[in-house]
Each structure stands twice: as structure tokens, then as C-alpha cells.
């Protein structure tokens, strides 16, 4: 499932089309990814509009077009954005194609857990304005983190890290990476963390967000070999610090990997 850095990578795939007009819109309007959107308005509205800019927040993306037109895109489990040559003909899973004179901007989603939301208005849509502070911002402070952990104090910290209202963009692999770096056992209730553990969690979250944006988010280069990420899916995966075997269990409904020596 695309997380913070993967979302940023896909957002930039449409950049070649910036500043240029949409000449035609093709879409599979009956698919559930368009739920809640006025399909006819979307199809008509975007034609002749320029693609002005785009932004990502956590797992959400917002594409701004001229004359107050907006498209929100969530990649769900399997969504992807890409560019194809002009005159591209959509295939089965290409649910939205914005044709331009020189290229086609394509949204593909084989499993249909993604979402495309059309909005018309001077300001960005409400759901976008209401989004939680991003991990890279000053508003995502240690004090705000401590309050969030207290509010969800009984849940295992691993499950709390997956809540988009507190950790926008964090998904399964990033959560495991963060807890491993902060030396925190994934099962510990969020409300039981000490002040020094909260500080370590805050640092590790900021670090993993920044470093994955600089690698995966930037042309999909690999994070360093020293990351847990490379070991967590492997049969016989080992802790990158001292090569002891990783533990695995389902926590918060998701497969979780941790090192029994680093995380006690
Ligand atoms: Zn270890």
C-alpha cells in the first residue's frame, strides 16, 4: 500500500503536464473510486483547463486546475499515476485519463481501493483543509504527539502509528521502521510510553519520513541497506543492527516485524 514517500513519488509523475491544458477526459465513471463525485461535471469541467500545481499531504494528493477546478486522488492499495504519449488509449484498469496535446496523464487502480474526488470552488475542498498536520511541519510537535498518544492510550503503539489523524502518510512498513529505530516494542500500549520513549518516537518518525522522501519519494531510489525495510518481508529476516532473527505477529490487524533484542 503506498505510504508517504510512495505517494510523493506518484504525485510527481504528472509533473510533465504542468502548465498545459487538458484536451479530453476519459474515465470509468461507474467505478467506486469516483463515489461522491459529479462525474458529468468532472468530464466537462476539466476540458480546456490548465494543470496548475499539485501537492501531497500524508496519503492524499490534490491536483489544482485553472478556473477553480480540483481533483483529489488517494491511491488506496494499488493506485498509480503515470504519463503516456499523446493519443494513449486507456485499458481496463486505467480509470482516469487526462489527455493533453503532448501526453496523457493516467490514473490506474487494479484493486479499486483508491479514490478520485472532483471539486469546484475558489478554495481547496474542505476535506483537504481539515487534514491533520504533516510530520514535516512545526505543528507536528513532541507535545502534540504526546497528547495524541494519550488519547489512544490503550491501543498498541503499532496500531496508533497507523492512524492517519496522528501520523499522516505512515503505513505498515514505515511504522515498523520507526518503532525499531526508537527501540519500542510494537505491542506496548501507547499511553505507557515514557517521556524519553516519546522523544525517541518523535525523532524516529521525523527521520523515517524525511529519509524515505529523499530516497523512494525521489525517483524511487532504495533507502540505505541499514534499514529494517530490507529485512522485514524476507524469510529468515534479521535485525540490521546485530543480525538476530526478527519476530513477527499480527498487531493492529497488520503483520508486524520487530527485533526482540532492540525492542523490549
Ligand atoms: Zn536488533
Image (spheres, grey):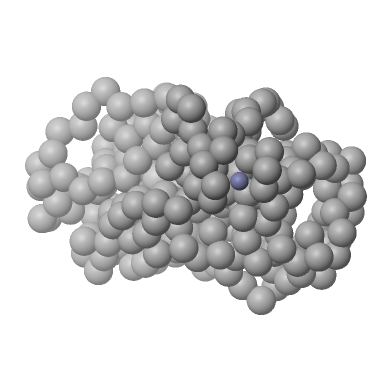
Residue 71 visible within the image = no
In which quadrant is the C terminus drawn? Answer: top right
Residue 195 visible within the image = yes
Work out whether 60 lies above or below 96. below
Indicate the position of residue 199 as horizontal and vertical percent values.
75, 66
Q: 174 or 104, which is in the foreground?
A: 174
Work out whether 67 lies above or below 45. below
Q: 236 or 101, which is in the foreground?
A: 236
Indicate the position of residue 190 as horizontal and vertical percent values.
83, 48
The residue lying at 21 percent from left, 32 percent from top is 90
200 left or right of 190 in image: left
> Which picture quadrant has residue 92?
top left
Query: Could you tell me how many numbered marks the image carries?
Result: 0
The residue lying at 58 percent from left, 34 percent from top is 246
Q: 60 or 198, which is in the foreground?
A: 198
The residue lying at 89 percent from left, 50 percent from top is 192
Indicate the position of residue 138 as horizontal and vertical percent values.
66, 76
Q: 148 or 72, which is in the foreground?
A: 148
> Which picture quadrant has residue 18?
bottom left
The residue lying at 40 percent from left, 37 percent from top is 79
216 left or right of 135 in image: left
191 left or right of 62 in image: right
Amino acid at each position: 500500500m503506498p505510504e508517504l514517500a510512495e505517494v510523493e513519488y506518484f504525485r510527481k509523475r504528472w509533473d510533465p503536464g504542468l502548465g498545459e491544458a487538458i484536451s479530453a477526459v476519459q474515465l470509468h465513471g461507474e467505478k467506486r473510486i469516483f463515489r461522491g463525485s459529479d462525474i458529468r461535471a468532472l468530464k466537462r469541467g476539466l476540458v480546456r483547463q490548465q494543470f496548475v500545481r499539485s501537492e501531497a499531504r500524508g496519503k492524499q494528493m490534490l491536483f489544482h486546475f485553472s478556473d477553480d477546478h480540483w481533483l483529489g486522488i488517494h491511491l488506496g492499495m494499488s493506485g498509480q499515476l503515470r504519463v503516456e504519449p499523446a493519443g494513449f488509449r486507456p485499458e481496463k484498469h486505467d480509470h482516469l485519463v487526462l489527455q493533453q496535446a503532448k501526453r496523457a496523464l493516467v490514473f490506474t487502480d487494479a484493486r479499486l481501493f483508491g479514490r478520485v474526488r472532483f471539486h469546484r470552488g475558489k478554495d481547496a475542498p474542505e476535506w483537504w483543509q481539515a487534514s491533520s498536520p504533516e510530520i514535516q511541519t512545526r505543528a507536528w510537535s513532541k507535545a502534540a504527539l504526546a497528547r495524541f498518544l494519550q488519547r489512544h492510550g490503550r491501543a498498541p503503539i503499532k496500531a496508533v502509528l497507523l492512524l492517519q489523524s496522528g501520523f499522516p502518510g505512515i503505513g505498515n512498513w514505515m511504522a515498523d521502521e520507526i518503532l525499531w529505530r526508537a527501540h519500542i516494542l510494537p505491542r506496548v500500549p501507547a499511553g505507557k510510553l515514557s517521556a524519553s520513549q516519546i522523544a525517541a518516537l518523535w525523532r524516529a518518525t521525523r527521520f523515517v519520513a524525511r529519509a524515505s522522501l529523499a530516497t523512494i519519494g525521489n525517483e524511487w531510489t532504495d533507502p540505505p541497506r541499514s534499514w529494517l525495510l530490507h529485512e522485514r518481508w524476507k524469510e529468515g529476516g534479521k535485525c540490521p543492527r546485530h543480525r538476530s532473527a526478527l519476530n513477527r505477529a499480527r498487531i493492529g490487524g497488520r503483520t508486524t516485524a520487530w527485533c526482540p533484542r532492540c525492542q523490549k
